[in-house]
Every structure is written in C-alpha cells, then in structure tokens.
Image: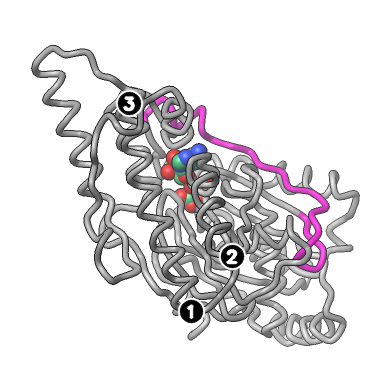
Amino acid sequence: MYFDIAKEKAKNLIDKKSALILAIESSCDETSVAVVKDGRKILSNVISTQIPIHTLYGGVVPEIASRNHTLQLTSVTEEALKQANVSLDDIDAIAVTQGPGLIGALLTGVNYAKALAFSKKKVLIGVHHIQGHICANFLEYPELEPPFIALAVSGGHSHILKVSDYCDFSLLGATRDDAVGEAFDKVARVLGLGYPGGIKIDALAKEGNDEAYNFTTHLEKEDTYDFSFSGVKTAVVNLVHNMEQKGQEIPESDIAASFQKSVVRMLIQKAIKAAKDTGYDKIVLAGGVASNSRLREDIKRMCNENNILLYYPSPVLCTDNGAMIGSAAFYTLMQGKISDIDLNAFATGGLDEFYRK
Ligand code: KG4
Ligand code: ZN
C-alpha cells in the first residue's frame, strides 16, 4: 500500500524532473539534515558535529555516535526545515544515507527516515555515502556534468571511479589496506596532534620541510589505480618510536610535511593516470581528505599541465553533510531507484554494486 503510493509519486517527480528532498546523513560522527531542490540547490544544510564528544576518546566511538544521532535527529530536522523556510508537507521525498558507514549510526538515520516517509506517505530514497561525496560538487558547480573521474578520499574510503553518467560508476582502483584519511588520523595520533588528525597534519605541514624524510609509497610505480597507505603510515610510526626511544626531539612539522607529500603524490598520480587512460578531461575530488590544501594545490597544477578540468567542493561540503545526500538522492530518484519501507542500512559495499542491485 505505502509503496504503491510512493511509486506513483516518484513517477510524477521523474516526469517533472523536479523534487524537493529532505536528506539525512548519520553514517559517522556528523548528524546532518538538509533540504535540496532538484539535486543542485541547497535550501538548508544543518550539521551537528559530535567531534568534541569523540575527541575525549581519540576517535569515533560507534555506540556513542549512534546515541547522539538519536538525540539530535529531530531537532536537526526541524532546524533544516526552518532554515529552508518549508514544512514537511512541501517535501517530495525523504533521502537517507544507507551505507557504507558505522552500522548503528546509519540505522538511526535510516529508521528516522523510514518513519517520516511512512507516516507522511513520502517517497523514500536510500543513498550511497560515496555518491553523496561526489555529488557535493554538483551543488557548487552548476555547469558540471558527467563523464568524469572521481577521486573519493575520506576516513573510510580511497577510490578512483569512472563516472560515466549520474548513476553509472565503475571502480578503477581502491586502497589495498588503509583509507587515506585513516592514515592521516593515525599519523596525527602518533605525533600527538589528537583527533580528527587530517586537518591538523595539513596545518602543521605548512611549517615543515617536505624533503626532510623520504617516505616511499608502495604501488606508486606500478601499473594499477590501486593505492596503499599502510606502508608509509608504518614508516612514520616506526620513525617516531625510534626517535622517542633515543630521547630525540620529534620534528613534527617536517614529518607531517614529508608524509603528506608522499601520500598526496600517490593520489594525484593515480587520478591523472585514470583521466589520461579513459580520455576523460575532468577530475572531481570528493570526501573529507579533498579539503587537504596540499592535495588541492598540487592536483590543480598537474591538471593544468595536462589540460584536465578540476573540481572540488568547499571544505564544508567535503565533510559529511546532508546536502550532498540530497543531491545524490535526486539523481538516484531520476533513475527510478526508490526504496520500500523495508530499507536497511549496510556497513560496507561499493557504488558499482549499489546500482547493480
Ligand atoms: O568524508 P569524511 O568527513 O568522513 C568519512 O566519510 O570518513 O572524512 C573524514 C576524514 C578524516 O580521516 C579526516 O582526518 C580527513 O577526512 N580530513 C583531512 C582533512 N580534513 C579532513 N585529511 C587531510 N587533510 C585535511 N585538510
Ligand atoms: Zn564521508
């Protein structure tokens, strides 16, 4: 009964090519709700971060994240509607991050979205988190359209994707071990910078000498789009521990700069290779690590040299947020892929599989 109504409503939206979407993101430590029009226009994007809570523990504690999402979801939703100057009745569809992410955290958003959709007989759209990160770019660049190469780099993912169309993704390469954001966070922790570490390494590296240490990255010279970050991470950890044992002072900024340089070099090299090999002339950065200033500067230079257009979102849209989910949901809806009330969260799974289901 619910799904028949939702399917009929979705059909109308697809015919009109228009939808006002309320989008919910709760995959990790940000509770965020946004209102997005037609996949491109942000009416509101409220982000309630839990970083101060998790900082106490040096990283995200999944159970605490879930509890805080539950506490925050209603008020963040009310605030998003208020800032957008719309009511729930004006909303055409409810979108929610279905995965990947922390399963308990995801379930809080999924269940909340299902309750809203069911009680108000709205279309429900489950969204893949990485598609959301990529679509953040559509919110800032009205002219941007596929095809392009996406470099999706976050705390949980390091992917190079061939994006042939809005919902047509092929995975070209991925990390074989740690995600790049994870490596940044681990190095920050060993340098005593605290959580979340990426942004702190980025800032500290500006004061350091990036040639002080030569951290070579495995797979850099190999003919693959895959990445590997655990080797460089371990090299930093061992270096710091050895220096500590010898009672030496740790040159934190030099280590941060040298580490960042080697990691960024690997990301850029593979992304440029993907663009050249596919003949695509656009690269899109996505995810929390896309805020990294060295990555942005160096890839911009490399793209210029190779006649490739480069796009990256402003930092607030690189981090987890509801607006990016609202954008992705619009394109998912336009494909006719809507969800029934048995929608479930998933902890792992790639974008290409998501659209094969
Ligand atoms: O996309 P995101 O907000 O959450 C996930 O989906 O994982 O990404 C968070 C990751 C963290 O590992 C964080 O340290 C990293 O992005 N990050 C950065 C920077 N800002 C955030 N890494 C390097 N440089 C930055 N400026
Ligand atoms: Zn994310």
Give coordinates of residue 167: x percent, y percent.
60, 78
Q: CA gap, disc 3 to disc 2?
A: 32 Å
Of tags 3 and 2, the one toward the viewer is 2
Callout 1–callout 3 Cβ contact below 8 Å = no
The part of the chain drawn in magenta is: 35-58
Q: Is residue 7 one of those drawn in magenta?
A: no
| Mark sitting earlier along the chain (2/1) | 1
Q: Which residue is mark 2?
A: 307
Marks 1 and 3, the one that precedes in the sequence: 3
Residue that badge 3 annotates: 254
Residue 233 point in image, percent of width and height: 25, 42
Residue displayed at 20% across by 48% down: 231
Residue ID for mark 1: 278
Q: Is 270 on the left or on the right of 31, as rendered?
A: left
**Label 1 CB-ligand 1 distance < 8 A:** no
Q: Nearer the viewer, residue 114 or 266?
A: 266
Q: Residue at x 32, y 66 (%)?
A: 226
Please give the label number shown on residue 71. Answer: none
Q: Secondary structure at mark 2?
A: loop
Q: Is residue 41 magenta?
A: yes
Can residue 187 be seen at all in this image of the molecule?
A: yes
Secondary structure at badge 3 equals: helix
Image quadrant occupied by the N terminus? bottom right
Circle 1: residue type: Thr
